[in-house]
Image (cartoon, rainbow, N blue to C red):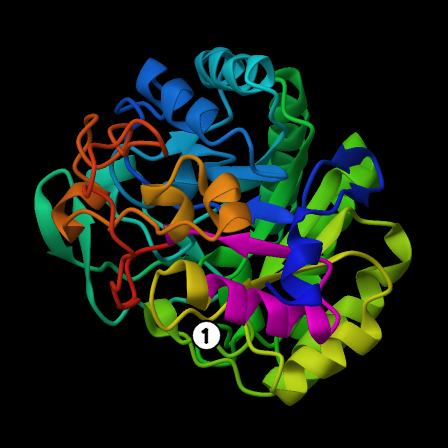
Amino acid sequence: MTQQTTALFAPARLPALDLPNRLVMAPLTRNRAAADGTPTPLMATYYAQRASAGLIIAEASTPNAAGQTYPNITAVHRPAHVAGWRRVTDAVREAGGRMFLQLQHGGRVGHPATSGLTPLAPSPVALPETIFTPEGHRPAVVPREMTGDDIRTTIADFARAARNALDAGFAGVEVHSANGHLLHQFLARNTNLRTDGYGGPAARRIRFTAEVTEAVAAEIGAGRVGLRVSPGNTVNGIAEGETQELYPALAERLGGLGLAYLHLVHADPGTPVFRSVRAAWPGVLIGNPVLKEVSTQEVHRASGALLAAGADLIALGRPFLANPDLVERLRLGAPLNPLRERYFMYVGGAAGYTDYPALGAQEAGASSDSMVALDGDRVS
């Protein structure tokens, strides 16, 4: 291991939380919640298995009914949701772990067949692809353009959901402004056609993300709030425009709040946007590296490059999915479990979810370094 990758196992600190290492389990949607969004006992097992991560960021959870994206995703706006998440956080805490909860509104990435509601978005621009619903893949619907009242209500819903998350036992929340969902739709020129104070030039397109984050910070304390962004990401039909202008401006606006962290999806230390965001952001920066394959060697390579470029923590998604003891495997240089077939990512049940073995529980020769390419699976 290099000096940089050895640093993965050093303690770190967020404003309101000590971390035993610098490895963060990134939030990935797995569709194991009940139909109403309540987390299940199986989810408590899944997250507790991965409690050795320095920080777990739990999968996207909707702050209101209109924000639902796909079937069987989690929510955090009803008492049953809070009680379900409390079972998860209790299990993780008993296993020695720490958790934040990601708050995500899908915006136009939603369907009446799933939520019972017409999706809301900055502008009436439909998702340019089908969307999975309880009735199978359906054509996307044209979302309703959000009014000023819709914007204010949604901001309040995010703040209330953050309070619910703390009541459920989370140490903090991550505001999701990435991967083509509602907040990212406000950032992007092709999905935000507004001519009011929330649209037009980049300085106005960052406003909604900033106001949501500020409201959540005011509700639960800035040190318990992170923000996730994905500069230049085109998933879910996004075309931002002015990427190099958007994200440093957002970092500068929020930099004085004292947030827990800024989380960059698919962070590439060789790009101008990474360097400019790092320069503009005064706090903890989480880098989610671009992995060419899921292997011990590749994780060390990509993580080392990000740490050397100024990232403070490293967020990993798929390596944690197949390796509940990922921290120990990386510390030892041990091989990783191969990922199961894509089919098991979102189908529900224990298969491909809680049945990955830890070191020492495997039959001789059963483990081999995975060489699975990253092919754009749904992430939260």
Is 247 inside the magenta-drawn segment? Answer: no
Q: Which residue is at a point 57% across and 71% down the rendered structure image?
A: 187
- Dot 1 alpha-carbon crowd within 10 angstroms: few under 14, some 14 to 19, many 20 or more: some
253 on left or right of 212: right
219 on left or right of 209: right
Observer-nearest of 115 and 10: 10
322 on left or right of 18: left
Observer-nearest of 24 and 380: 24
Q: Which residues make up the magenta segment?
A: 299-318
> As displayed, is residue 374 above or below residue 244?
above
328 on left or right of 35: right
Q: Amino acid at mark 1?
A: Asn
Q: Position of residue 10 (x, y in %)?
A: 73, 47
Extreme residue in the front direction: 364
Q: Position of residue 200 (x, y in %)?
A: 62, 81
Q: Which residue is at a point 24% across and 58% down the rendered structure image?
A: 141
- Quadrant for the N terminus in the image: bottom right
Observer-nearest of 164 and 299: 299
Q: Position of residue 75 (x, y in %)?
A: 44, 30
Q: Which residue is at a point 58% across and 46% down the rendered structure image?
A: 24
Q: Which residue is at a point 36% across and 26% down the rendered structure image?
A: 37
Question: Which residue is disc 1 drawn over?
Answer: 233
Query: Residue 103 lies in what quarter of the image?
Result: top right
Q: Position of residue 243 (x, y in %)?
A: 60, 83
